[in-house]
Image: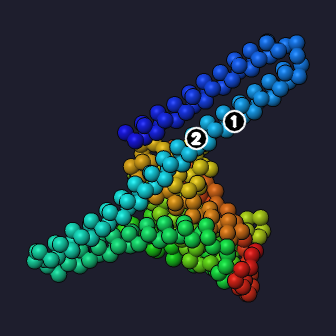
Amino acid sequence: MNITRRRGAIAIFITLGVFLVGVAVALNIGWIILNKRTVAFAILGVILFALLIAGVVLNTIFLVREIRRNERQNSFLNAVTHELKTPIASIRLYLETLQRRTTTEEQKQQFYRIMLSDSDRLLATVEQVLKAGELGQRARQLNRVAIDLEALVNECIAITLQRHNLTPDAIQLQPVSGAVRLHTLGIPEDLRTAVLNLLDNAVKYSPNGVHVRCTLAITRYTWASLRITDTGLGIPQNQLKRIFHRFYRVPGRDMLRIKGTGLGLFLVRNIARQHGGDATATSPGPGLGATFTLTLPLTNPSHPPLSAGSTQ
C-alpha cells in the first residue's frame, strides 16, 4: 500500500512538472509573438524562460529523488526492525520453553545452539548498522597492519559456514597459484566485515542451493583481487552499480523475499575504497548467479604499519 502511494506521489510530481513546463513554453511563445518587434524584450523573455524551465526541472528531479530516498530509508527501517525482532522473539520463545517445561539435556543443548545462532544474527545486524555510521566519520585514523588475505578469507569462510549451518563444500577457496602469500595493509576488523558481507550476500541470494567459489589472485602486478562467485538469483545489468548505494536493494518479488538491511554492499565498497581499493559486481543476468570482486593494493608483509592519521 505504501509503495503504491509513493509511486502515485512520484507520478503526480512528474505530471505537475510536465504541466508547468508546458505552461512556461506557451507563455514564452506568447511573449515572443507579442514582442516580436522588440528584440530586447524577446531576448529577455528567452532568458527568463530558460531560467524558469531549469528551475522547474531541477525542482522535479529533487522531489522525485527525495521520495525515492525516503522509500529506501523506510525499507531499511522495516528490514532492520524485522532483523532485530525475529531473533529476539525466537530467543524469548526458547527461554520461556526452558522456564515452563521440563526438557531433556539433549533438547536443552539444541535450544542453546539455536539461541546462540539467533544472538549471532542479532549481533551481526547491530554491528552492520554501527559500522555504517562509523565509516562515515572515521578518516583512516587507526593503525594499519599487514594482513594475510588467504588466512583472512579462510577465517571468514569458516564463520559463514557455521553461521548458516553449511557443509564445507558449499563455500570453497581455490588455492592461490604458485603458493604465493598475498598481503595488504589495512584494518583487520574492517576487511573481515567486508569479506563476511560478501559471503553472506552470496549465501542469502542462493535459495536453491549454495555453491560459492572464491579465488585470490594478483592482478596488474600490484593488486590482489578476491572474487566470490555464486550460482544464485543473479543481478540485472542496470542494477550492478546501484546495489552499492546505501539502503538500496534490487527490486523484484524474489529479491524482496530475502531479508536484508541494504547496507552490506555499501559497507563493502566503502571499506575497499578506504583501503585504496574498490568493489565491483558482474552478473550474466537474473537467475545466472553473480560475481563480486574485492580489489586491494598489495604490500610487503615486512612493511611497517602506518601511524594514526596516515593515508596510502
For residue 24, above or below residue 140: above
Tag 1, which secondary structure?
helix
Residue 55's disc number: 1
Residue 63's disc number: 2
* Residue 139 image offset from top left, x and y in percent: 67, 73
For residue 29, side relative to residue 190 (left or right): right
Dot 2 amino acid type: Leu
Q: Quadrant of residue 253?
A: top left
* Residue 74 image offset from top left, x and y in percent: 45, 51
Tag 2, which secondary structure?
helix
Q: Quadrant of the N terminus?
A: top left
Name the foreground residue: 309 vs 18: 18
* Residue 53 image offset from top left, x and y in percent: 71, 30
For residue 104, side relative to residue 253 (left or right): left
Q: Quadrant of residue 55?
A: top right
For residue 57, side relative to residue 208 (left or right): right
Mark 1 vs mark 2: which is more N-terminal?
Answer: 1
- Around disc 1, counting alpha carbons within 10 Å, would you say few (fewer than 14), some (14 to 19), or many (20 or more)? few
Name the foreground residue: 147 vs 21: 21
Regarding residue 222, the answer to whether it shows in the image is: yes
Residue drawn at the location 72% of the way across and 85% of the way down: 307
Residue drawn at the location 56% of the way across and 52% of the way down: 243
Name the foreground residue: 163 vs 54: 54
Q: Quadrant of residue 46?
A: top right
Q: CA distance from mark 1 to mark 2?
A: 12 Å
Residue drawn at the location 69% of the way across and 23% of the way down: 24
* Residue 60 image offset from top left, x and y in percent: 61, 36
Dot 1 amino acid type: Gly
